Amino acid sequence: MSYMRINIGPIHPSTHGVLRLVVDLDGDTVKNVEPHIGFLHRGVEKLMETRMYMQNPSYTEKLDYVAPMGWDELYVNSVEMALNSKVKEDAQYARMILLEFQRIASHLLWLGTFCNDVGQMFTMFMWAFRERAKVLKLLEDVSGSRMFYVNMRIGGLMRQLPQDFIARAYALTDYLESHIKEYPDVLDANGIFIERTKGIGKLSKEDAINWGVSGPVLRASGIEKDVRKDNPYYFYGKTKFNIPTSMQGDAYARYRVRYLEMLESISIIRQALGMMPENPDVAGLPIKLIGPQAKPDIIINRRELPRGEGLIYMVPDKQKPYRIYLRSPTYTNLQVLPYISKEVKLADLFSILGSLDIVMAEIDK
Amino acid sequence: MQENKDEFLNSEKEMSKLVVDSLKKYKMPVNALFTKMSDITQKSAGGLLKWSHSNSLWPLQFGLACCAMELMDFGASRIDAERKGYLLFRGTPRQCDVMIVAGWVTKSMVPRIKRLYEQMASPKYVIAYGECATAGGPWYESYNIIKGIDQVLPVDVYVAGCPPKPENLFAALMKLQKKVGGKTDGDNERSLSENMRRAEAGRL
């Protein structure tokens, strides 16, 4: 029996980024999906070998443009490991706070676009972007840029925090909490949303381990794994937070896990703000053309990024990386797509794709 | 009825007399007068067209990389571009006037972008949004990136920044509106009579 083969993308509105899907259809049922990647490939790992250490953060930020600060911090921390330099204690708190704010902004953007994908048009999108704009405004006042912050320096941040930062951050967490708690009223009470997410794109516990997925996709399949808990960096060991998990492993579970993660992030931010001293000294080293020399040891560093576990493997040279490898979480998460979208309807393919939360720049590198 | 007809004929005669008198007075050749009159009608009709074009610029829903995040914000609650008539993002190129190239353009993407541009109905405009679409940006040394979309398509407005704020896109679209409305600063299109006047001045 022959199937109808259709081409979706690379510029389809439902694909997040320039992803091309070749789909074999039997009527309306998907028989096989083949993702084609590489439309954003630019050779970032090779380009990074030609730059000095502190010129590279602007490359790593553009890997995951929905949450740039995660990769920025991961790379700069790898450089700090290579240079054997310590991060200031106040700066560690400040980094935790900024990273968690970035995680909330990333999940808000995901929620807005995901609801567009499943046909819950534009209400959630507008609400999520309203809150995201508030978060980005705070990050802009800290770093000077709206989207690509390049805020991390060796040993701390680019500059001191604004004077009213702590009060503003507290006010923002209150604002976010009160608004985020309104979301289930339009999502969990919405028949269309439930119909299009519950039981769609199921990924069992064993399959999740075998495919090597990470982040919210893994936790939605019932595995309690989070780098912040397993291998705590900064003061994540001191803070108390839960890892939201779900046993269902479908698109609804992934939404639920991300939703609860936003609330957990708010509680982490509050704890870190409470522990941070009143006038924190967070400024790191300024960028110099020739910086301190690195010791030639292989660096392996990992972080819990909003989309999963990011890893940097770096062989340092004296002033620049000799070889660098970036393990992007969404690359492995996308591999699951053909497996879990067999025998679903074509319309459900996009709620599965949306629930995986992919960023193409990170996949293509 | 008859009176009306007479009146009409009389007025026509008067008009032609007036024209002839004025021609004698200003020493203007007849064909020059007609070109001037056609200029006026063209201006009024073309102005209407341009005005309506410039106030319904529909962009193509087409994001490549990071700058597409700011495109999303452009349509969201903070900026609300719909109030100016810019925001009717269409999924098909056949209904669109403006292509906003937001992000870096790889070599494998070039034929697809070209094809999308060719599918758009004329008149069509291109905005290069961000450093990568303008000149390659940070990927200038990469082997797989073309150095600016203007190597492939004719660009009307460039927007600088990495990424530019959504407000910058708003300003760019207002600039494009001016250009479509025929009111660009410095580079005004010369009208037909203006050309003629210049030619005559040269002859004299």
Image (cartoon, rainbow, N blue to C red):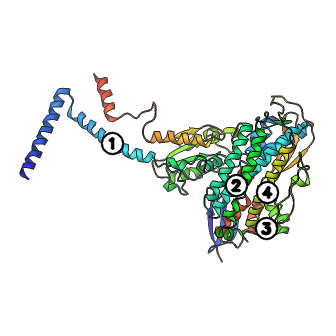
Whether tag 2 and tag 3 are in contact, CB under 8 A, the answer is no
Disc assigned to residue B44:
1
Q: CA distance from mark 1 to mark 4?
A: 60 Å
Question: Residue pushed farthest left?
Answer: B2
Quarter holding residue B195: top left
User: The disc numbered 1 marks a residue on which chain?
Assistant: B
The amino acid type found where label 3 is placed reads Gly
Query: Quick check: do tags 1 and 4 share a chain?
Result: no
Left or right: where A285 falls relative to B74: right
Whether tag 1 and tag 4 are in contact, CB under 8 A, the answer is no
Q: CA distance from mark 1 to mark 3?
A: 64 Å
Q: Position of residue A148 (x, y in %)?
A: 71, 41
Mark 1 secondary-structure assignment: helix
Q: Label 3 belongs to which residue?
A: A249
Q: In the displayed structure, would residue A72 be above or below residue B2?
A: above
Q: Residues within 10 Å of mark 4 (few under 14, many from 20)?
A: many
Q: Label 2 belongs to which residue?
A: A179
Q: Residue at x 60, y 49 (%)?
A: B110
Left or right: where A124 falls relative to B2: right
Q: Label 4 belongs to which residue?
A: A261
